[in-house]
Image (cartoon, rainbow, N blue to C red):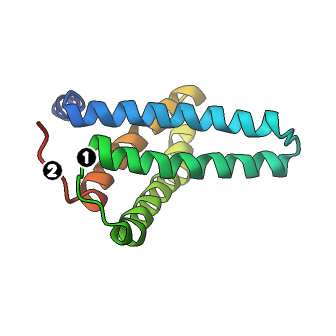
Amino acid sequence: MQNLLQLIWLKLSQPRSLRFLVVGILGATTNILLLEALVDCLHWETAFLRSLANVIATEICLVATFFAYRQIVWQIEEFDWRFVLQTELPTYHLSIASVIAIRSLLLFPFMDWLGIDLIMNTVIGIGIGAILTYTLSEKFIFTEREPLS
């Protein structure tokens, strides 16, 4: 277990991992602020409209973070709109959907069954989700990367 924690710490201390964390935190913060703005400014007060606002805010932030991850985290200089729109962006959406499904359908219920506190369960789920997102992005989405300086 200690070797796994050391491996995770070494990975997190790399420049790309730090940029990934910063972009992820900014994306999550933007998502929350955009959601609040849609609900408050447009007075979307019903459950349906709040859910719609959540979908809109999430999708805007997913697309924005995709491009931020691509340019800032993985520093891919080559840009082909067709490849990005037909391959990378759909694969990114699929990977995010997979991570959400794993967190929501497997991890959360399992940790809840174990009696893990709700907040701790969520924090652990976010951490595991971030690790899965990083791994999937590195292995399957942003495979054409320039070496880091």
Measured as percent of width and height from the top left, residue 29 is found at 55, 31
69 left or right of 11?
Answer: right
- Residue under label 2, please give it: 146
Cα separation between marks 2 and 1: 7 Å
Q: Is residue 15 above or below residue 75?
A: above
Place of residue 41 in the rendered image (x, y in percent of width and height, measured from the top left): 80, 35
Q: Residue at x 66, y 52 (%)?
A: 55
Q: Is residue 68 left or right of residue 112?
A: left
Q: Nearer the viewer, residue 64 or 9?
A: 64
Is residue 69 at all visible to an observer of this figure? yes
- In the rendering, at what x and y percent does residue 97 appear? 50, 58
Q: Which residue is mark 1?
A: 74
- Count of marks placed on residues: 2
Q: Residue at x 52, y 35 (%)?
A: 28
Quarter of the image that includes the N terminus: top left
Amino acid type, callout 1: Trp
Residue 49 percent location from the top left of the image? 82, 49
